[in-house]
Structure formats: C-alpha cells, structure tokens
Image: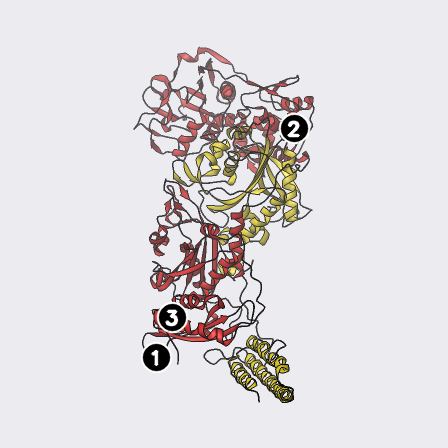
Chain colours: A yellow, B red
C-alpha cells in the first residue's frame, strides 16, 4: 500500500483516539474523511500516478475510507453512551439510569427585579413616551433647592410636613424630588418636559406604613401656554396607561408653596374600582398626586419670565403604588433582602 | 378643626345636608375628613372634621368656613352682629398697655370687664364647645374659646387683680425669667420668647399659653381680655422649641387677621355681658401703630383661560370673588381688593386659584399639551445603570434595596472605614441605627444575607444597585452608583445528584462578574488578588477594567461572618457603576466566524502552586502567537503524586488559521515553544 495512505491511516487512528466529544468528532470527519479532507485530497492526486498503479491505489484508498468511516461510527456510539451516563465526581450519576421525567426540573433559578424599581421604570417609560426626559438629582441637597427656590417661607407651617435630616446648617437629605425642578430650570431652557425619580428622606420613624426613606416621582413641564387642564389631562393619561381606561381622576384644591393653583389628584381606587374597600377607606378614591401650576415665584427665582412661560408640576410616592399593585401590606418589606419576598416578583 | 354643623348654619343657613356640604367643601379645597355625631347636653350634634391647608388660617373659624359654604353652596352668609354696651368708666383708668416689641406684636387690643361673675356657662354654650371638642371650664374661659372657634381670633383672659401694677407689657423675656403656664409646667425663658408681662414678671407666653397665677378663677371679678396679633414665625419658633401646640398657637402660626382683634374682643364682651353680668369699660386698650390696609390687585380676565384653560366671563369672575368677600371694581382689568383675613392672596395668580377652586376643579376639562419640540428619553448613564440591574437579574440574582442611612456599628463590622472611607453623619439622627450615610453597599448586603440565613433560607443571591455616599474634597458629598452583590448557597431550582457542584463559590461569583462586564461592554477586565480587610485570606481580588480599579470580589472572612452570626460561606462583590460606565466601549468588536477547523492540544502543566493561572496563561498566549486562538483551563489538580508544593493545571490550546487548515508541522513547534517558555519562566513541566 502506498506509504502516504499508511501514514494517513496512522495519523487518523491516533487523532480519533484523542476525540472526546461530538465537536471533536466533527472536526475529525472534516479533516480526514470529508469532501475537503485529506483522503479526498490523496485520491485527487491519483491521476499523477502511473496508470498501472492507479487501480490498486484506488482500492486501498477506498478500503481505508471504509475503515475510517467504521471507526467514526464506533466512536460516535461511544460518545453517545458517554453523554448518557457521565459520572459526576464522587461517582454519583448526574442523570439516573432509568428515565423519569417527573423528577423535578433542575435549572438555575431566574433572577428578579425589585417590585419598586419595576414600577418606577414602568412609570418613567410612560412619561418618556409622552416626551419627558429623565433627570436625576442629588439625595444630599442644598436647602436652597429643597425649599428656598421652591417658594417656602422661613417659618411657614408647610415645613411641618417636611421634617428633614441635616448634614450641615444648609445641607440636608432632600425631602422631595421637587428639588430637581429649580436645578433643571437654572440650567436648561424651556420648553421642558422632565421626570425625576428617586429617594427622599423625612424624619419619620419606621413602621408598617411609615419610613424615613421612600421614593417619589416628580414631573414638570414648562412651555408657552401650558394650562391647568393640560396638567389634569397629562395625569389622567398616565393613570389610564397604568391602570386601565376605566380609571377616573379627581382633582381638588390643595396647597403647596411651589404651585399655584395647587391640586391633590385622587384616582379611582385600583383595588375596588371605585366601589369602596379597606384600601380606600370606603371612599372609592385613593389620593395619589400633589400637583399644580408652577408658582410664578419659582419661575422668576429660576430666571424664567412667568408672563412668557407657564408650567405644571406633579409628584407622587411610588412605594405606595408598588404596595397597591401587589397588595404588599408593610413598607418595610420594600427595604428588605428577604428572598421569600423578592422572589415573588 | 371640629365644625359643629348646626352652629355653622347660624352663619350660612344652607339647606344641604352635612354630607352634601362636606362634599362641596372638600372639592372646594377644605377637606372634610370625617362626619361625626357628638353627645352633648343638648343632644347629639353633627360635627364636620375639617383639615384646612396650612395657608388658610382663615378657615380655622366657623365664620371662615361659613364664608366658603356661602361661596360654594350659595347659602346666605350671616356673620354675628357684634354690639357692646359700655359703662361710663374708661378702660385706661384700670390698666395700662405698653408694647416693647412691635415686630413680634404689631397689634394688641384689650378690653376691661368689671363685676364679672365667674360661674359655669349655660348649657347651650357648653354644648357647642363640647361638640367642637373643647372642655367647658367657666363662663369667662368658655367665652374666649367660643370666640376663638367662631371668629378664629385667640383671646386670653387675665385676672386684672393678679397683674402687678395693673400693667400689661408685651416684651421679650429676659434670660433666666421663669413662667409656669396653665399646663402646670414651669419653663425657663430667654430673649427669643415673646411674653405678656405685668410690672414685674411674665404672665403669659404670648400667643401660646397663659400663666398659671394670672388666669381667671372663681374669685375673679375684674378681667383684662386680650385680643392680639403676633408674628406667625415667632410663635411657631417658640411653640416648636417648647414642643407646645395650642389652639392659639396653631392659629397664630397660620396667620390671624390683624384687623379682627377688636371685633373679636367685642364679641366676647357682648357674650360676657349676657352670661356673666359683666360691665365693659369704655374703649379698648389699643396698640396698632401701623394699621394694615387691604391690598388691591389687578386681575386680567383673559388670564383665566390662558392659565387654567377655563373660559369664565369677567362677570362670572367678579361674582366668585365677591362671594368670597373680595371687593371688585369691574374694568378691562378687574380691581380686586383683598380682605386682610385672606393673608394668602397676594398676586393675580392667587386670585386665579380662587376662581378655579369655586368654579370646580372637577369641571376642568382634561387636555394634553402639544408636543412642542421636546424629545423624551433617558441619559446614557441611567440606561447603563438599568443594564447593570438587568444583567445581574439575568445571572439569577434577586434585586433588593436597603436604606441609605445605616449604623456606624454595622459599617464597623464590615471594616468599611478601611476600604470605603469615612461615612457622612446626619446631625439630627433619630437613632444610631440610621445615623450615617453608607459609603459602601457591603453592610446592607451582609446584613440581608444574615437575615435570610437566620430564617432557614440557606440560599440567597442578592444584589442592590443604588447610590453610596462619599465625602468629597471640598466638603460636598459625592453620590456614585454602586452595584453590590452577595451570594450564599447555590441557586438551582432543584439540586438532586448535583453534589457539591450545586453550591456557589468565589469562582462562580467571578464568572458572574465576568459575564456581566462583557454584557456591559466593559472589556480588558483583570482580577488582581489583593488583601481586603473583610475577606478570607487569599480570597479577595480587585477588579480592574483597562487597568483602572472598578471594584472587588471576595469571600467574607470568619471575623466578619461572626459579627453577623453567619457560618456558611458568603461571597461578595462591589462594583463602581460610574467607573464601569467610563470604562465601557461604545461598540462590541465583531469577528466573522472562522471557516477553517481548529486544532486542539491539551497540556497538563505541573508548576509550583505559587505560580498563578494568569501567569501561566500569559506565557502561553505570548508564545502562542497569532495561531493560538484560545486557551481554556479544564482541570486543576493538587495531590501528593505531583510532589510537595506543586499543582497541575490542564489547559486546552486551540489553534486556528483564518485561511487554511493548520498542519501538525505548523502547530507542533508552537506547542514546543510554549512548553519551553513555561519551563524557563515558571519551572512548569508537562505532567507525566
């Protein structure tokens, strides 16, 4: 037999022994027995041989091909058997001999995103669709942005609801995401549509319904000719996008130093759909939004002419929405790492 | 405020039910939180529990509420008619008034009542007070409370014969002066406190509470009735300081009409003549050097539609404002005179709010603003932060969130100071537990891992992506976003036949981080072994991207685990998301999948254990040159058969040429070169 065939046979047999998996076997096939393999290449060279040697060479080459194909088949069977019963370290079979597909599935657990952050991102996405840009402000805030520029008067009882944690005489943990309003107004020119999510802090003890830390979503728009009706329409659009077309929005007067007129926005109770239940204290409404037309004092303080620019602003607590959505009864769960809680979302 | 419904109807005789009125008031801006029935000597009375906003001091009176009922429900407004019969003797004959702080007390009015017979009030008066939640005491005190509720003006009755020198002096307290107030508490005062004094001593904490020994008793016959106006901020500061909140201070803080003092004191005199046989001295003691006049504002009628989106005619606007007690002169611009009890109305926009409030927020039509040249969206950085969260969730972790406020003790337990620096303290913390801002997420991670382990949950894969707080160079506080990760136990849905492979270890954590960073397009990532203060020795590494430190991975040390009462292994990592954002690549490199087969060679390298995998691989790559496509580790073995201090690392080398199939002759010399270099550099040899 031709030396070249012999060498190829030796090489092939040795290489096949090294093959450990299907991928290796595929590579082997393409290297030796495939259309572009070495054996085919040798057969092509047959025409260079003297005519009398050709038949013998051809026969030998075909025998070799036959042999290699048999070896490949054996190897393939061996590999299959190996896949069937691989042995884990320690000798326990990962897959039992007798198939039983009623055994529990065995996968990596999926991960979970936090329910509050899910809700927050869902809300932001709606406002982004309405043309709002997402802007975040600092948690450690200057009194100026948290109160002064928002038209809070020193010593006004409105400050009672905003008991703050201080880091210094004029530095505090922001009590409301509204602090982002003046920050944006002082650095960007209208028209503006901004939403701002984030943590806020108030000096409040922690229990099932209170927390010194919670989350707000603030939104505001400044443009020529924006009206109170636009504010109401924006919030209604948002609420229906989240909770469905049957949701109603009830507006009633309220007071915030940085809006005038100011409104409290209540939504049809999302649990009882307005019939009255424990969550809405039987009223059929849940109070959600603080809102209003941006006070001219705020616009002026931020360098915007209130005769030219009009705007509206709104804000609401997001933790409560997450709790309502899932029926979570204790706000402290939102700040815990209890996997029994987190894995439900 | 408790508003007895029948009493309210004396000033606004509506035909609507209490429920209907409550609904109108609530939608008009005066929230009625509840409607209650209260038992009184005159039978059951209906009471509206109102909750006025902090800018509407005028709604802290029945007459004020009645005015709203008039404007919102159309009932006729009938405030009380006040008439006082005086005796011939002038008030100034009995007492003198001196105000030394006109800023703190812009107005002080007092009447002198003689021949007062102090006794219990008649039942009708007691019933009204009880319905309003006020305990009847005696007719004099009851009348002051009655007028407080009716008109919103706090009054105080002094026993004239207890005032030394028959003097009333309004002044700042002197440091060290003491006053026992009616609640029986003696407080030490100073210059920040405004007091009412007699010739020698303070007799009342102005606007908050009277003194114990100058009040009206059964023996009292001559009464000084105070009706004053105090600066809201001053009253608020003092009340807060002494943690006192009284019916009087609550109202003064929210502004009481400076022009209402005389009417209020007269109303009280009128009632005391009726029910206590009092004689009223002629005239009042009065200090009011700078009378406040009603302001007139201009209202452009078309602003209503421009700002609110509702079309009200000038006449409709005038009608609403007049119903609320404003005086209106029609014209192209309405001239609106604001009564001084509406301290909250100072601008045109405030009038517009009154219009829409009475018109009805519920009638306001919802519109959507036109998109005017604005584009919505998120910053690239915020999207990146969300990618970090999604990447970690995709790796099978549970997202949690913990408080930014934490305790120094917990930070100490994870050695935070040694790797994350000082924590920024809150100056007025409520407890040690929440007294500093976290400079690292590690404390919360370990705490919550322990929380799970202590509740029979031996598997917890947690992460949190949120801000930490670091003091900046110039006193500011930086708030970078970090990603914190903690693993304990495995995370298979079922573990049968998996053996120890089902549990997490530090290499699994490393793999998670590597996959995450690749997802985030942060390339050229290295892990450099480092001693971390909270890590088990040898089980900590700094994570670097393009040579810049971006975080760490570690297994917790026994010391830290003990501090949290944890026994099983816990693996933690923290990444500076801002640094990752800076290190990320905008694009992901793409390579066409190879057309030619690869050739693999397996090498079992035996080298001293001090030689790291990274060191060996680095040599392999350097010597492998362009033909070497990949190096993977497929076995690590340590055992006596290798000799002391040795380790075997089995690696698979993949060789490939982009344009042809490689031959043995091309690969063999490269492998030999690699083996030789490994031997020279690290005394590595092929395992026999």
Q: Position of residue B201 (x, y in %)?
A: 33, 23
Q: CA distance from mark 1 to mark 3?
A: 25 Å
Crowding around mark 1 (Cα neighbors within 10 Å: few <14, some 14 to 19, many 20+) is few
User: In front: B350, or B236?
Assistant: B350
Crowding around mark 2 (Cα neighbors within 10 Å: few <14, some 14 to 19, many 20+) is some
N-term mark: 2 or 3: 2
The residue to which callout 1 is attached is B640
Q: Which marked residue is nearer to the observer: mark 2 or mark 1?
A: 1
Does the CB distance between marks 2 and 1 fall below 8 Å? no
- Would residue A246 appear left or right of B506 to someone viewing this image? right
Q: Quadrant of the C terminus of chain B?
A: bottom left
Q: CA distance from mark 2 to mark 1?
A: 89 Å
The residue to which callout 2 is attached is B306
N-term mark: 2 or 1: 2
Residue B677: numbered disc: 3
Q: Which residue shows up at 58% across the image and 63% down it?
A: B592
Q: Position of residue B197 (x, y in %)?
A: 36, 22
N-term mark: 1 or 3: 1
Describe the element under mark 2 as helix, strand or loop.
helix
């Amino acid at each position: 037999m031709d030396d070249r065939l012999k060498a190829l046979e030796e090489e092939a047999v040795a290489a096949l022994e090294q093959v450990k998996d299907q991928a290796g076997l595929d590579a082997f096939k393409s290297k030796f027995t495939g259309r572009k393999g070495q054996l085919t290449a040798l057969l092509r060279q047959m025409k260079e041989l003297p005519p009398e040697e050709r038949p013998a060479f051809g026969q030998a080459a075909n025998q070799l091909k036959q042999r290699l194909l048999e070896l490949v088949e054996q190897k393939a069977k061996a590999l299959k058997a190996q896949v069937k019963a691989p042995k884990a370290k320690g000798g326990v079979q990962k897959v039992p001999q007798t198939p039983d597909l009623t055994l529990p599935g065995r996968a990596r657990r999926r991960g979970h995103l936090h329910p509050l952050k899910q809700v927050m991102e869902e809300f932001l996405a709606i406002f982004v669709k309405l043309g709002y840009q997402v802007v975040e402000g600092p948690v450690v805030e200057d009194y100026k942005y948290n109160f002064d520029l928002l038209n809070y008067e020193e010593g006004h009882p409105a400050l009672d609801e905003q008991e703050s944690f201080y880091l210094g005489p004029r530095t505090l943990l922001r009590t409301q995401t509204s602090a982002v309003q003046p920050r944006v107004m002082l650095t960007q020119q209208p028209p503006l549509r901004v939403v701002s999510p984030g943590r806020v802090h108030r000096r409040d003890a922690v229990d099932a319904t209170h927390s010194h830390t919670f989350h707000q979503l603030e939104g505001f728009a400044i443009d020529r000719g924006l009206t109170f009706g636009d504010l109401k329409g924006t919030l209604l659009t948002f609420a229906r996008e989240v909770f469905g077309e049957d949701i109603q929005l009830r507006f009633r007067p309220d007071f915030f130093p940085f809006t005038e007129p100011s409104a409290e926005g209540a939504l049809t109770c999302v649990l009882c759909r307005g019939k009255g239940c424990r969550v809405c204290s039987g009223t059929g409404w849940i109070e959600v939004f603080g809102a209003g037309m941006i006070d001219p004092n705020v616009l002026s303080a931020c360098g915007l002419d209130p005769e030219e620019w009009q705007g509206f602003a709104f804000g609401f607590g997001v933790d409560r929405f997450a709790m309502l959505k899932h029926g979570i009864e204790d706000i402290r769960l939102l700040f815990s790492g209890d996997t029994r809680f987190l894995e439900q979302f | 405020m408790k508003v007895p419904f029948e009493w309210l109807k004396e000033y606004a005789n509506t035909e609507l039910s209490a429920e209907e009125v409550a609904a109108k008031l609530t939608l008009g801006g005066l929230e009625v939180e509840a409607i209650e029935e209260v038992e009184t000597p005159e039978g059951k009375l209906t009471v509206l529990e109102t909750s006025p906003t902090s800018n509407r001091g005028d709604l802290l009176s029945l007459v004020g509420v009645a005015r709203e009922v008039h404007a919102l429900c159309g009932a006729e407004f009938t405030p009380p008619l006040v008439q006082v019969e005086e005796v011939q003797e002038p008030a100034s004959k009995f007492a003198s008034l001196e105000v030394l702080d006109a800023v703190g007390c812009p107005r002080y009015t007092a009447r002198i009542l003689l021949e007062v017979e102090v006794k219990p009030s008649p039942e009708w008066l007691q019933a009204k007070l009880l319905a309003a939640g006020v305990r009847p005491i005696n007719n004099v005190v009851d009348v002051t409370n009655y007028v407080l509720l009716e008109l919103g003006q706090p009054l105080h009755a002094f026993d004239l014969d207890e005032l030394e020198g028959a003097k009333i002096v309004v002044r700042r307290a002197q440091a060290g002066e003491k006053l026992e107030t009616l609640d029986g508490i003696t407080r030490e005062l100073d210059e920040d406190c405004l007091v009412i004094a007699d010739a020698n001593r303070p007799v009342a904490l102005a606007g908050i509470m009277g003194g114990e020994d100058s009040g009206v008793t059964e023996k009292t016959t001559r009464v000084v009735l105070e009706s004053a106006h105090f600066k809201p901020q001053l009253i608020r500061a003092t009340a807060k300081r002494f943690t006192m909140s009284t019916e009087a201070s609550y109202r003064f803080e929210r502004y009481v009409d400076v022009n209402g003092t005389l009417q209020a004191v007269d109303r009280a005199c009128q009632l005391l003549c009726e029910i206590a046989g009092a004689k009223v001295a002629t005239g009042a003691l009065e200090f009011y050097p700078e009378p406040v006049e009603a302001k007139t504002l201009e209202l452009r009628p078309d602003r209503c539609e421009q700002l609110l989106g509702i079309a009200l005619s000038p006449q409709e606007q005038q009608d609403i404002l007049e119903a609320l007690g404003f005086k209106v002169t029609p014209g192209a611009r309405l001239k609106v005179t604001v009564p001084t009890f509406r301290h909250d109305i100072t601008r045109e926009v405030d009038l517009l709010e009154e219009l829409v409030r009475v018109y009805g927020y519920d009638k306001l039509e919802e519109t959507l603003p036109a998109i005017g040249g604005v584009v919505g969206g998120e910053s690239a950085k915020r999207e990146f932060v969300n990618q970090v969260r999604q990447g970690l969730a995709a790796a099978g972790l549970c997202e949690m969130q913990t408080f930014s406020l934490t305790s120094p003790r917990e930070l100490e337990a994870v050695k935070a100071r040694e790797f994350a620096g000082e924590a920024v303290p809150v100056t007025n913390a409520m407890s040690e537990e929440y007294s500093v801002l976290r400079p690292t997420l590690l404390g919360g991670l370990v705490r919550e891992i322990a929380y799970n382990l202590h509740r029979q949950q031996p598997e917890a894969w947690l992460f949190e992506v949120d801000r930490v707080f670091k003091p900046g160079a110039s006193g500011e506080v930086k708030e970078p976003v970090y990603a914190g990760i903690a693993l304990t136990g495995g995370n298979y849905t079922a573990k049968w036949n998996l053996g120890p492979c089902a549990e997490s270890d530090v290499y699994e954590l490393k793999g998670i981080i590597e996959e995450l960073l690749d997802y985030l397009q942060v390339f050229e990532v290295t892990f450099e072994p480092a001693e971390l203060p909270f890590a088990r020795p040898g089980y900590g590494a700094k994570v670097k991207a393009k040579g810049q430190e971006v975080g760490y991975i570690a297994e917790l040390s026994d010391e830290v685990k003990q501090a949290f009462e944890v026994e099983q292994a816990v693996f933690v990592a923290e990444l500076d998301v801002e640094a990752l954002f800076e290190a990320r690549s905008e694009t992901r490199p793409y390579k066409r999948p190879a057309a030619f087969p690869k050739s693999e060679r397996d090498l079992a390298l035996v080298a001293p254990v001090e030689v790291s995998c990274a060191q060996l691989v680095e040599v392999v790559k350097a010597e492998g040159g362009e033909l070497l496509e990949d190096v993977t580790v497929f076995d690590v073995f340590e055992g006596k058969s290798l000799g002391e201090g040795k380790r075997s690392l089995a690696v698979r080398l993949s060789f490939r040429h982009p344009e042809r199939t490689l031959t043995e002759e091309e690969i063999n010399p490269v492998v030999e070169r690699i083996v030789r270099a490994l031997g020279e550099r690290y005394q590595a040899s092929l395992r026999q």
